[in-house]
């Protein structure tokens, strides 16, 4: 539980907290709020931290999944990214070894460097047509990844983005 007096939380503050089950921000906090076991910076609409039981809100309170938001959350097995999200920042889901599949909606325009790096349980990824940029080593070391579908909006794929991948399907415009 984060008190209403906390007005600054650094990037990566909860990284690797594998036992974290609940995130609550006290009412009246001027900077942060919580919803669905997610810590959200209210003004920027950035999901700052999540845990294995997080559900990203479907309202417009989250437009960006922040740097390191779920970093090292090995217990995270599934996540639904709502259409309100436009950015997935660097290392947002890195080390989420329990994550098995992810579908990135058309609303997302960019996926940051190392965003899903080390998600060894990940077997399939679908990247929506709105994504134009896939970051450096985005899916690096996702050794279980066997299927990736890339939408037709992608214009830039970072180096080693799909290192060790056996099959990629790029949809035609």
Image (cartoon, helix red, strand yellow):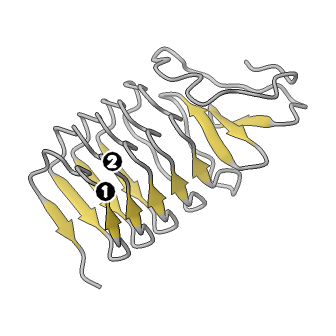
Percent across and percent down for residue 57 are: 63, 47
Query: Residue 9's quadrant in the figure?
Result: top right
Residue 39 sits above or below residue 26 on the image: below
Closer mark to the observer between disc 2 and disc 1: 1
**SS under mark 2:** loop
Residue furthest front in the image: 159
Residue 20 sits above or below residue 131 on the image: above
Residue 172 sits above or below residue 35 on the image: below
Image quarter of the N terminus: top right
On the rendered structure, is 166 left or right of 18? left
- The residue shown at (51%, 29%) is 53
Q: Indicate which disc, 2 or 1, sits on the residue closer to the N terminus.
A: 2
Image quarter of the C terminus: bottom left
Q: Which residue is mark 1?
A: 158
Percent across and percent down for residue 55 are: 55, 40
Question: Along the line of sight, which residue is nearer the eye, 23 or 65?
Answer: 65
**SS under mark 1:** loop
Q: Is the C-beta separation of discs 2 and 1 under 8 Å? A: yes
Q: Marks 2/1: CA distance?
A: 8 Å
Q: Residues within 10 Å of mark 1 (few under 14, many from 20)?
A: some
> Can I make out residue 127 in this image?
yes
Q: Which residue is mark 2?
A: 138
- The residue shown at (37%, 42%) is 114
On the rendered structure, is 172 left or right of 15? left
- The residue shown at (86%, 24%) is 4
Query: Residue 164's quadrant in the figure?
Result: top left
């Amino acid at each position: 539980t984060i008190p209403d007096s906390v007005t600054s939380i650094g990037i990566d503050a909860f990284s690797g907290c594998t036992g974290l089950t609940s995130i609550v921000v006290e009412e009246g906090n001027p900077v942060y709020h919580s919803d669905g076991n997610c810590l959200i910076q209210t003004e920027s609409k950035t999901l700052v931290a999540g845990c294995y039981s997080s559900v990203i809100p479907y309202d417009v309170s989250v437009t960006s999944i922040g740097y390191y938001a779920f970093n090292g959350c090995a217990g995270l097995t599934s996540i639904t990214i709502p259409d309100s999200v436009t950015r997935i920042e660097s290392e947002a889901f890195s080390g989420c070894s329990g994550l098995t599949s992810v579908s990135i909606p058309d609303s997302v325009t960019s996926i940051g460097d190392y965003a899903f790096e080390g998600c060894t349980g990940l077997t399939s990824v679908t990247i929506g047509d709105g994504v134009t940029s896939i970051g450096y080593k985005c899916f690096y070391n996702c050794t279980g990844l066997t299927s990736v579908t890339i939408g037709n909006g992608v214009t830039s794929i970072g180096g080693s983005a799909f290192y060790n991948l056996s099959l990629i399907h790029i949809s035609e415009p």
